[in-house]
Image: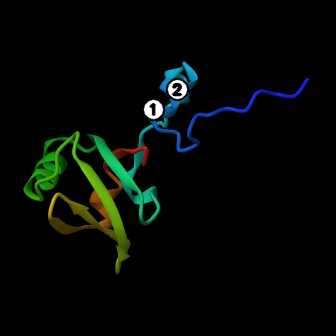
Amino acid sequence: MPEALSTAPSCGCPAAGAMTGSLADAAPDILLNEMNIGVTVQVTGVLGGRKTARELGDLGIRTGHRLNILRRVPGGGLAVRYSAMTVAIGSALARQILVRPVCPL
């Protein structure tokens, strides 16, 4: 008997888990610097304490905000778009920002 085809998106987002009936399929939090160019992510947390959270807040980015990863910048950082702004996030800060991919559907 052939296996049933899944209609859930393969992006690993929470919507995919909801469609298959299990949130266990949802994507885990990933460090921002590990994400690919062109992906939209949601900030889920910050490692490193108050100083790191303040640096991110100074850029206008907070937990829950969505970022579009535009390109890598020299030195290992990332250029991201948030709202109508494009900001560069250095590699040290990008390694302390937890994100989750956002389903494009």
Q: Nearer the viewer, residue 55 or 60?
A: 60
Foreground: 94 or 100?
Answer: 100
Answer left or right for 2 relative to 94.
right
Q: Amino acid at mark 2?
A: Met
In the picture, which quadrant includes the N terminus?
A: top right
Colour scheme of the rendered structure: rainbow
Residue at x-position 20% and y-position 69%: 86
* Separation (CA) of disc 2 from disc 1: 6 Å
The residue that label 1 is drawn on is: 15
Q: Decide: is 65 above or below 25.
A: below
In the rendered image of this protein, does residue 29 appear above or below residue 93? above
Q: Residue at x 51, y 33 (%)?
A: 16
Front residue (pair 24, 88)? 24
SS at mark 1 in the image: helix
Q: Is residue 72 above or below residue 14?
A: below
Left or right, 78 with respect to 3, comes to: left
Q: Residue furthest top?
A: 21
The number of callouts visible is: 2
Is residue 51 rendered to the left or right of residue 13?
left
Which numbered tag is attached to residue 19?
2
- Give the percent coordinates (x, y) of residue 77: 33, 69
Residue kind at label 1, given as amino acid type? Ala
- Disc 2 element: helix
What is the x, y in percent for residue 39?
42, 58
Label 2 close to label 1 by CB (< 8 Å): yes
Q: Residues within 10 Å of mark 2 (few under 14, many from 20)?
A: some
Residue 18: % across, % down: 48, 24
- Where the C terminus falls, by quadrant? top left
